[in-house]
Amino acid sequence: MIDGKTRLCGLIGNPVEHTMSPVIHNTLAEKCGHNLVYVPFLVECGRIAEAVKGAYALNVLGMNVTVPYKSDVIGSLVEVDELASHIGAVNTLVRTEDGYKGYNTDMTGLYRAMTSEGIRIEDEEIVLLGAGGAARAVAYLCGAQKAAKVYLLNRTLEKADKVAEEVNNAFGREVIVPMLLTDYPKLPERKFLAIQGTSVGLAPHEEDVVIEDAAFYQKIHTGFDLIYKPFTTRFMRLVREAGGEAYNGLKMLLYQGIIAYELWNRVEITEEEAGLVYEKLKGNIGK
Ligand code: NAP
């Protein structure tokens, strides 16, 4: 029941109507017996600094940040965690004594999701499709988790070049190899972990896929699509048809939320509790 001691957390972004984060946080609050409510806040263009200041003044415990404010919000924070600072994007604000500290739980969430499925990054040769906001952060994660090599394939080569330069500089080694998307036949003859980080295949364009050629999928032992709507993407089907294992991005969404919840409430969420939230999320996307 909402009473005088109820704490507030929320999501700031534009748009926010589609978000599943309230399902994650309100379920966790209920399961953990925390007196906490999570709501979405639509923030109009140009008003992110006001929104953060207002949230702090209103004693809001923590915030998630989504598109288009993940970079813009940084100027309103008192501190930024090292990984988030490298990536240049923050999706979680944690209340401190003087203001909010920023974190990037999208990436730690992806790492926890992969680990929970038994997928390794360390020493792996990886194919990363895309060089947008999400793929850029994945490239950092791969650098930080000591991937052997990441072939970064993008439709616009300049964007792949830029991400490669930044990440290679950050880690002091040539871990990212930028390539044009259509150059996938030039990939070495071996099996890769492939991470699908483009927006191609997202509902309602469920039959779209960034590479159609079945020969490409012969080179993938495990495919991880950041998309979770549809639950089984065309990319995942093509990986499975070629004999590989395939996963969607729903556990990434789940764990980015769980890690934010843990930071706000200084608790550890058990795998059993995570499983309950996961089932609710699946129900929410019609699975
Ligand atoms: P973004 O910054 O807009 O980047 C989009 C990427 O897709 C770019 O690399 C772009 O290539 C590529 N792309 C778009 N249309 C294309 C086409 N027709 N052919 C080839 N490439 C195309 O988007 P983002 O924020 O990185 O998000 C990417 C995906 O990750 C989205 O589907 C999002 O839902 C998903 N995501 C999931 C989670 C999760 O929790 N599971 C979290 C974050 C994001 P160019 O550079 O050439 O334009």
Image (spheres, rainbow, N blue to C red):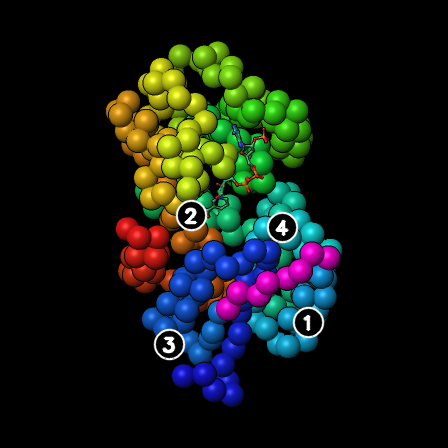
Q: Is residue 211 above or below residue 166?
A: above
Residue 35 horizontal side relative to residue 141, left or right: left
Instruction: Give the residue number, with chain letter if any, for mark 3.
Output: 33
Q: Is mark 2 within 8 Å of ligand 1?
A: yes
Q: How many marks do you count on the picture?
A: 4
Near-viewer residue (182 or 44): 44
Q: Earlier in the sequence, mark 3 or mark 1?
A: 3
Instruction: Measure the alpha-carbon separation of dots 1 and 4.
Output: 19 Å
Q: Residue under label 4, please give it.
A: 68
Cβ(mark 1) to ligand 1 < 8 Å?
no
Q: Any mark on residue 54, and which? A: 1
Q: Position of residue 257 (x, y in %)?
A: 46, 57
Q: Residue at x 42, y 76 (%)?
A: 34
In the picture, the quarter occupied by the N terminus is bottom left
Q: Is residue 244 left or right of residue 99?
A: left
Residue pushed farthest front?
Answer: 204
The residue singled out by tag 2 in the image is 252
Give residue 155's mark.
Answer: none
* Label 1 SS: helix
Label 3: element kind: loop
